[in-house]
């Protein structure tokens, strides 16, 4: 009995320590329960907020679709679709951007097929909006215009000559793409050159357009080469050479510096030896120069 009593006998400080330990254990349990409840409430609150936010987003999407579907379509030119109109039509940002990039190149969509090819819109959207496409009236006759040769004169006029070096003002304006101003410019330039030696010299005429150039080539050609009065490079003065076509002041000075250096050119091909000589113009320059 004495031994048993000794096992349950504690000092005052030991009893206080045991009591403190029990209190700490109880406090930890209370804090654990409180924290667990707090986390549950927080999770529940977060879930409720997410659900409410998702509901609001769904509501906004539905409202957005209703506004789109209620948009009243009227005839319009698809080349001028703005960001806002494209959105109302149901186009994506990428599809609208493709159309705007295409238009920045000064190009136009002239058919429903062109529109889909450029924008890449779906067949379903195209079917919905294409009935409202309104193209300019000339587009309807596009094929007829494309088939019409642009080089054929609309006037019933028989040219006096098919040699470009013999044609008159009236001959030139009989070409559809050649107006009166251009016809006069061609004749003046022909006179300056003493006649066209190459047909592509027509491209050098100021204001010459690709349509006019092609139209002239369809009707006229060089039948007889012009007789050009050549200048002797070894005896000509600076002013005489400077007046020749294709020779500016800088090139003329280089030619005379070279002539002074070699004393006399034995053959005209020596011009190619001049530093920075325009080799691409050699064939044209030697039309007017010779070495004697």
Image (cartoon, rainbow, N blue to C red):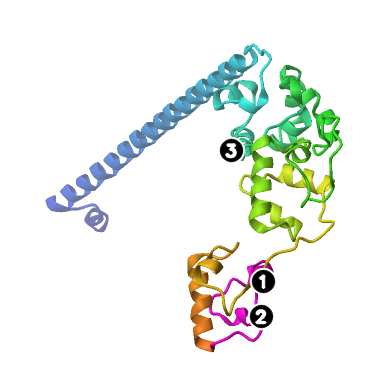
Residue 97 drawn at (x, y percent): 59, 36
Residue 244 in the image: above or below residue 31:
below
Q: How far is the residue under mark 1 from the one under mark 3?
A: 45 Å
Residue 88 drawn at (x, y percent): 60, 20
Question: For the image shown, how many numbered marks are present on the structure?
Answer: 3
- Residue underneath mark 3: 104
Q: How far is the residue under mark 2 from the one under mark 3?
A: 49 Å
Residue 117 drawn at (x, y percent): 74, 37
Say what secondary structure mark 1 lies in. Answer: loop
Residue 184 in the image: above or below residue 285:
above
159 vs 246, nearest the viewer: 159
Identity of the residue furthest to the left in this view: 12
Label 2 environment density (alpha carbons within 10 Å; few <14, some 14–19, many ≥20): few
- Tell me which label, 2 or 1, sits earlier in the chain: 2
Examine the rendering and report whether any part of residue 77 can be seen.
yes
Label 1 environment density (alpha carbons within 10 Å; few <14, some 14–19, many ≥20): some
Please say if the residues under marks 1 and 3 sit with CB atoms less than 8 Å apart: no
Q: In which quarter of the image is residue 40?
A: top left
**Span colored in magenta:** 263-292
- Residue underneath mark 2: 269
* Residue lying at 78% horizontally and 40% vertically, measured from the top left: 171
- Residue underneath mark 1: 286
């Amino acid at each position: 009995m004495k031994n048993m009593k000794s096992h349950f006998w504690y000092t005052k400080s030991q009893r206080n320590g045991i009591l403190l330990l029990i209190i700490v254990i109880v406090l930890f349990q209370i804090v654990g329960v409180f924290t667990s409840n707090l986390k549950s409430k927080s999770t529940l609150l977060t879930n409720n907020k997410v659900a409410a936010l998702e509901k609001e987003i769904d509501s906004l999407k539905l409202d957005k679709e209703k506004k789109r579907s209620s948009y009243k379509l009227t005839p319009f030119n698809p080349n001028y679709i703005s960001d806002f109109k494209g959105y109302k039509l149901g186009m994506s940002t990428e599809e609208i951007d493709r159309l705007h990039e295409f238009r920045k190149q000064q190009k136009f969509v002239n058919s429903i097929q062109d529109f889909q090819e450029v924008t890449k819109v779906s067949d379903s959207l195209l079917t919905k909006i294409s009935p409202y496409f309104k193209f300019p009236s000339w587009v309807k006759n596009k094929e007829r215009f494309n088939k019409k040769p642009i080089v054929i004169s609309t006037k019933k006029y028989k040219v006096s000559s098919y040699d470009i070096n013999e044609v008159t003002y009236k001959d030139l304006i009989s070409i559809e793409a050649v107006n009166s101003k251009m016809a006069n410019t061609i004749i003046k330039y022909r006179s300056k050159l003493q006649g066209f030696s190459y047909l592509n010299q027509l491209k050098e005429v100021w204001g010459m357009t690709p349509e006019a150039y092609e139209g002239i080539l369809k009707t006229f050609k060089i039948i007889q080469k012009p007789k050009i009065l050549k200048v002797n490079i070894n005896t000509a003065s600076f002013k005489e050479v400077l007046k020749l076509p294709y020779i500016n002041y800088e090139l003329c000075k280089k030619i005379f510096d070279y002539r002074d250096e070699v004393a006399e050119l034995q053959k005209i091909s020596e011009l190619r030896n001049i530093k920075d000589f325009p080799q691409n113009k050699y064939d044209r320059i030697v039309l007017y120069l010779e070495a004697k």
